[in-house]
Image (cartoon, rainbow, N blue to C red):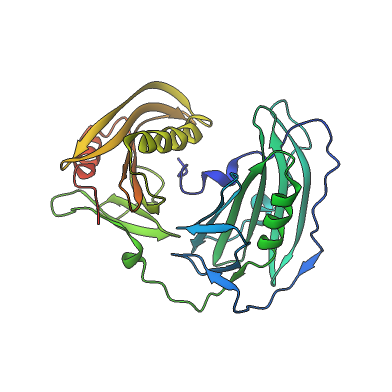
Amino acid sequence: MKQILPLVALLFVLNACTSTDRTLDIPKVVSTSRTTEHQQIPGTRIFMVIPKGYTVSGTTIRKADGADIMLIESRGRALDKEKDLAMAPKETPAAVTFFQKNFMLNDHLANIQYGKVRKQKVEKISLVTGDDSFLVAALCEMPENNTVDREEIVNALKTIIVDKSVKLDDAALRNYTLDFTRSAFQFRKDAAGVFYYTEDGKGDAQHNVVTTMGPLPAMPRVEDMKTCARALMKRVEAVVVVKARTEKVVSIQGKPAYEITMNMELDGTSQNVYLLVLGNTQSAAYFLGYIDDDKPALWKECKELAQTFQLK
């Protein structure tokens, strides 16, 4: 099974509404030079000019009215020209695509899509770019029919530069700790702040895997953690068959957290899923495990490792 959450946003369909005649100012070639206004996105090699009125929180850039840009960099993952640059359907029962285009963004192939899910009152823009050594995705939302936000986001996306010469200390970027002293799980790889742990650090990091991600925006209340956990799991549930699910507030070493467990089926494989969201007044992080049904001992190991999850 392919990992769902870290790059799940790449799979969402951008579409909706009645009129599909909405274009974005995207030329065939966008060439940008790095300036003093460019800001490095924490934990990535991505530099972007942040629009006025937006604040940076981790890899998300937000505006008070609900507009936001989430940036993801996956190092070591090549751009798949057939999949990542593929055009979305113009219309589906759930959504409609207003605009989409393949172009060059600072010497790299790129694809941008703009649309709306019919039942939501927000519009979405996604951008994917990369080469044979990295993939970057920008996932954006804005209030419906807000042309100011749309222009601000598009202009910001056109300033994206990936500086592959930048060296990142990924370990220093983690706002959490895990105790692997007696765990069967060991570090396998990282991709843009998403850390993968597999049994003995081996395998393809797509089956029987634990992933962690942080920092996320501050979540001082349990209600914030619950909202985040449900939103994350909603993305998972959109592409799987859910057979059972439970959720509750738990205590991890004396600190409140929100837990969701689920049994699901994807492509004929039955799996257990364990999600834990931990937050405080400074930041938050999540712990997510996907374990095959026929690995009960590893499922136990996954939940035991989650008990050592702590924010710094």
The quadrant the N terminus occupies is top left
The residue depicted at 46 percent of the width and 48 percent of the height is: 6
Residue 258, image x, y percentages: 31, 35
| Residue 220 lies in quadrant | top left
On the question of residue 211 being in view, the answer is no
Residue 25, image x, y percentages: 81, 58
Q: Residue furthest left?
A: 182
The residue depicted at 55 percent of the width and 75 percent of the height is: 163
The residue depicted at 45 percent of the width and 38 percent of the height is: 232
On the question of residue 209 being in view, the answer is yes
The quadrant the C terminus occupies is bottom left
| 32 or 295: nearer the viewer | 32
Residue 200, image x, y percentages: 24, 53
Residue 271, image x, y percentages: 37, 31
Q: Residue furthest right?
A: 21
Q: Is residue 233 left or right of residue 203?
A: right
| Residue 46 lies in quadrant | bottom right
> Can you say whether 271 is above or below 136 in the image?
above
> Can you say whether 168 is above or below 217 in the image?
below
